[in-house]
Image (cartoon, rainbow, N blue to C red):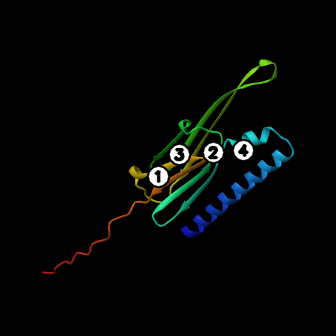
């Protein structure tokens, strides 16, 4: 039964991501400024699992790496970001644009916290998380007396 739950969860995340992208494209095509701002507050995130690592890819364009906060606590990866920009409009009017987001991603296995690495290039955040490797089980012979 757990396999079914994982499959449904994975498919639902994929469906949500696809629907968000569709809505974003529709809003851009019809010049609807309100919806893209709402959708852009939640970055697209993909969690890949290899034999030795978990790899998290997040689309976070426009942010400086100094304004991103990444942490792992109790098996949950948290990615937060905050951005402030001053925009000068026609007539010298200054507007402040502020955007922030927070995403929590439950990790499917135990990980080695001290070896996590992250890179941020061209608006893509990649987090490489090594999986915890348990020691091989030992077999101990017990003598019967």
- Is residue 42 among the parts visible in the rendering? yes
- Where residue 82 sits: x, y (%)? 60, 35
Q: Secondary structure at mark 4?
A: helix
Quadrant housing the N terminus: bottom right
To which quarter of the image does residue 68 belong?
top right
Q: Nearer the viewer, mark 1 or mark 3?
A: 3
Q: Nearer the viewer, mark 1 or mark 2?
A: 2
**Mark 1 → mark 3, Cα distance in angstroms:** 10 Å
Q: Earlier along the polypeptide chain: callout 1 or callout 4?
A: 4
Residue shown at the point (26%, 75%) measured from the top left? 139
Residue shown at the point (60%, 50%) measured from the top left? 58
Q: Earlier along the polypeptide chain: callout 3 or callout 2?
A: 2
Q: Nearer the viewer, mark 1 or mark 4?
A: 4
Pointer 2 local density, CA inside 10 Å: few below 14, some 14–19, many at least 20: many
Residue at mark 3: 78
Residue at mark 2: 60
Residue shown at the point (53%, 36%) measured from the top left? 66
Res. 75 mark: 1
**Mark 2 → mark 4, Cα distance in angstroms:** 12 Å
Relative vertical location of residue 140 with respect to residue 77 in this rendering, above or below: below
Q: Secondary structure at mark 3?
A: strand
Q: Nearer the viewer, residue 132 or 60?
A: 60
Relative vertical location of residue 108 with respect to residue 32 in this rendering, above or below: below
Quadrant housing the C terminus: bottom left
**Mark 4 → mark 3, Cα distance in angstroms:** 19 Å
Pointer 3 local density, CA inside 10 Å: few below 14, some 14–19, many at least 20: some
Pointer 1 local density, CA inside 10 Å: few below 14, some 14–19, many at least 20: some
CB atoms of marks 3 and 2 within 8 Å: no
**Mark 3 → mark 2, Cα distance in angstroms:** 14 Å
Residue sitting at the far left: 145
Residue at mark 4: 39
Residue sitting at the far right: 30
């Amino acid at each position: 039964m757990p396999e079914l739950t994982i499959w449904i969860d994975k498919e639902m995340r994929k469906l949500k991501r696809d629907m968000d992208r569709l809505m974003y494209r529709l809003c851009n095509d019809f010049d609807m400024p309100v919806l893209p701002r709402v959708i852009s507050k939640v970055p697209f995130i993909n969690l890949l699992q290899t034999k030795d690592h978990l790899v998290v890819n997040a689309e976070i364009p426009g942010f400086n790496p100094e304004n991103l906060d990444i942490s792992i606590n109790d098996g949950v990866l948290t990615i937060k970001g905050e951005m402030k920009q001053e925009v000068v409009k026609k007539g010298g009017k200054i507007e402040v644009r502020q955007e922030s987001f927070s995403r929590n991603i439950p990790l499917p296995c135990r990980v080695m916290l001290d070896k996590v690495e992250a890179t941020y290039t061209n608006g893509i955040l990649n987090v490489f998380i090594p999986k915890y490797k348990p020691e091989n089980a030992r077999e101990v012979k017990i003598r019967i007396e």
